[in-house]
Amino acid sequence: MVRNRLCEILQIQYPIIQAPMNWVSGADLVAAVSNAGGLGTLGPNSGAKTVTRDVERTGERMRRQIQKVRRLTDKPFAVNVIVGMGESLRYSKKVTDVLIEEAVPAAIVSVGRPDIYTRALKRAGIKVLHAISTVRHGRKAEDAGVDAVICEGFEAGGHKGFAELTTFTLTPMVSDELRIPVIAGGGIGDARGILAAFSLGADGVYMGTRFMVTRESESHPAVKQAVIEGEDVCTVSVSKEFMLARDLRNQFTRSYTDLKSGDAGSEELNRFLKDHSQYHAQSLGCVDEAEICCGQVAGLITDCAGAGAVVNDLVKNIDARLKDLKQRLSGLL
Ligand SMILES: Cc1cc2nc3c(=O)[nH]c(=O)nc-3n(C[C@H](O)[C@H](O)[C@H](O)COP(=O)(O)O)c2cc1C
């Protein structure tokens, strides 16, 4: 793979980004991906074993993970800022302050407006990648001065807006509209997905679920096994108060959907989510009773390799997949 404009901006070898994952993407995973030439990203609660609602502690836990990444790699990496709104802005403000104090190379900013932190992050020399799910959000992010946008399609694991636009439709629409680099995320699990993303106009790819099932990921072994066993229809999109979440189908998704379609109020629903959270699945191993964010691409994942080997394989297989593509396209060329 030749270094493209996204690689130049991020100073990385391959335009392959390991997406941030709550309780999953800690320093070991981030360093393994970055050492292999991609961009690793620290997610919320990385390296943590307990839940905290303390703003200071949240930020300081992230600072320790950043420092750990630096002991494991001298390559660029990113850290996730979940913007949020209302009370949760206190957390994102603290995390942003830590990113600036620690002078991290890049921030992946998600779930919120691009005009809140972009200027401060950029002023500190930090590259800003902003996750979007519609063309309008993309335009706003470009206007706010971000370095690149990440198109998060409906296939993606985790939380996103209500737009339901797929990677296949969102990526070309956004790349037609914006001048800055576009990164495609959601549903990419192998070299075929990478080629498809680039055909749609992307300058890079963003992969979460594939990296959740790697040796260095902090995901509980039982969760990794459940994803490996997952087939094509193993995920479902569940509707929450302010967004959608794509999760592995299990007793949690069934119970939550039943509660939601019944007469449960928002207090009861929120209590249920808190008692059956990603922490319970990813840290404690409650694979059936708790929430496991997971993308549709789970059906393509059959092994739990090292994250560096995953990056190497993705890159190695591009050539063969490209040859195969050219052959199948020959009738049209
Ligand atoms: C287990 C899991 C946890 C996630 N947690 C976060 C998060 O904390 N912050 C965030 O911005 N996105 C989060 N996401 C979304 C990913 O960053 C990314 O958008 C998604 O995984 C891409 O789609 P894919 O899973 O098909 O590769 C999460 C995804 C997964 C699978």
Image (cartoon, grey):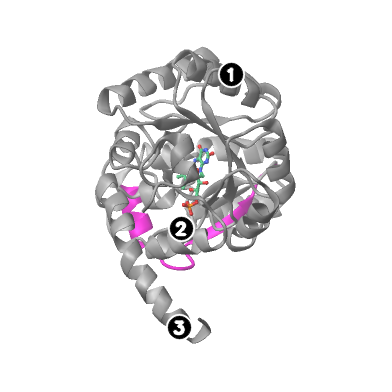
Q: Residues within 10 Å of mark 3 (few under 14, many from 20)?
A: few
- The residue identified by callout 2 is 188
Q: Residues within 10 Å of mark 2 (few under 14, many from 20)?
A: many
Is residue 128 inside the magenta stretch? no
Q: Is residue 101 above or below residue 279?
A: above
Q: Residue furthest bottom?
A: 331
Is residue 223 inside the magenta stretch? yes
Q: Residue at x 48, y 13 (%)?
A: 101
- The residue identified by callout 1 is 123
Q: Is mark 2 within 8 Å of ligand 1?
A: yes
Q: Residue 312, percent across and down?
A: 27, 52
Asked if the residue at tag 2 contacts the one at tag 1, i.e. Cβ–Cβ closer than 8 Å, the answer is no
- The residue identified by callout 3 is 330
- Name the secondary structure under disc 2: loop
- Name the secondary structure under disc 1: helix
| Span shown in magenta | 222-241
* Count of marks placed on residues: 3
Q: Residue 125, percent across and down?
A: 52, 21
The disc, 1 or 2, on the residue closer to the chain's N-terminal end is 1
Amino acid type at circle 3 is: Ser
Q: Which mark is residue 202?
A: none
Disc number lying in front (1 or 3): 3
Q: Quadrant of residue 24?
A: top left
- State the residue in front, 135 or 82: 135
**Alpha carbon separation for disc pair 1 and 3:** 49 Å
Disc number lying in front (3 or 2): 3
Amino acid type at circle 1 is: Arg
- State the residue in front, 34 or 299: 34
Q: Residues within 10 Å of mark 1 (few under 14, many from 20)?
A: few
